[in-house]
Amino acid sequence: VGVALISALLFPIWHWLDPFSTLHDMGAWVVRRLGITPWEPSEYPERLVQWPAVIGFAFFIWLELGLDQGEPSTLFIVVAGYTALTLAMMAQFGRDTWRANAEAFTVWFRLLNRLAPLALADEDGRVRRRSFAAGLLEVNWTVAEIVMVALGVGSILFDGLSQTQIYFDLFGFTEVPLKTALLFAFLGIVVAAALMLVW
């Protein structure tokens, strides 16, 4: 929550906190020290735009709001698996390319940073000043980015609504399958409404 607020109100803090980039850079340093020549990254498929990040974001929303997280092992498996996938894809397509297009947290925090008065100027970490919320108008929004924002808003609304008496009266204590269905039905309505407003 703190990273989201700082990203939206101040500056792109995730760029320096991102643990996946740190692990990638450490691995790249070890490879260089061993004298291994790294392969050239593949070209990222343009047709994918930010859809991998949107899918990852939806998965983490489900993990938070739809899945019973009683077992710590579940979170460990998810974190380990996501980290391994992210590092593999950074090696395949390049660290900065994967971050900008497909890593769920980076794409999400960069979307939030479009509000902030300090924006990332380049991948080296330099920042630039701008008027508050000017970043919303600086770039063309992709459909994937609009969907991601709608998922973020919808997840917050669903989280609040699922704690109300009305929700409990209608659905009671919901098990994972029903809660998952309700969550994605609600998110689908929010996403559809957002896309209708845009088009």
Image (tube, rainbow, N blue to C red):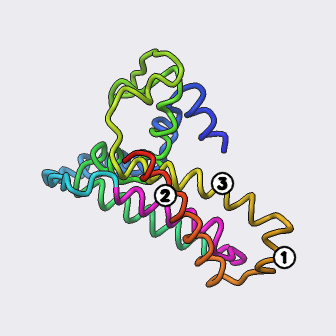
**Mark 3 belongs to which amino acid?**
Ile
Q: Residue at x 33, y 45 (%)?
A: 142
Residue identified by numbered label 2: 191
Comparing 40 with 112, the one in front is 112
Crowd class of label 3 (few under 14; some 14 to 19; many from 20; radius 10 Å): few
Residue 188 % position (x, y): 51, 65
User: Which one is earlier in the sequence, the residue at label 3 or at label 1?
Assistant: 3
Residue 70 lies in the magenta-colored region: yes
The amino acid type of the residue labelled 1 equals: Asp
Residue 37 in view of the camera: no
Q: Quadrant of residue 169?
A: bottom right
For label 1, the residue is: 169
In the rendered structure, find residue 156 and report the number of the disc placed on it: 3
> Is residue 131 on the magenta stretch?
no
Give coordinates of residue 68: x percent, y percent: 69, 77
Q: Main secondary structure of the magenta part?
A: helix
Number of dots carrying numbers: 3
Separation of residues labelled 2 and 1 (CA atoms): 26 Å
Dot 2 amino acid type: Val
Look at discs 3 and 1 and give the one toward the viewer. Answer: 1
Left/right of residue 13 with respect to residue 93 in the rendered view? right
- Image quadrant where residue 100 sits: top left
* Residue at (32% x, 49% y) in the render: 101
Region rendered in magenta: 51-73
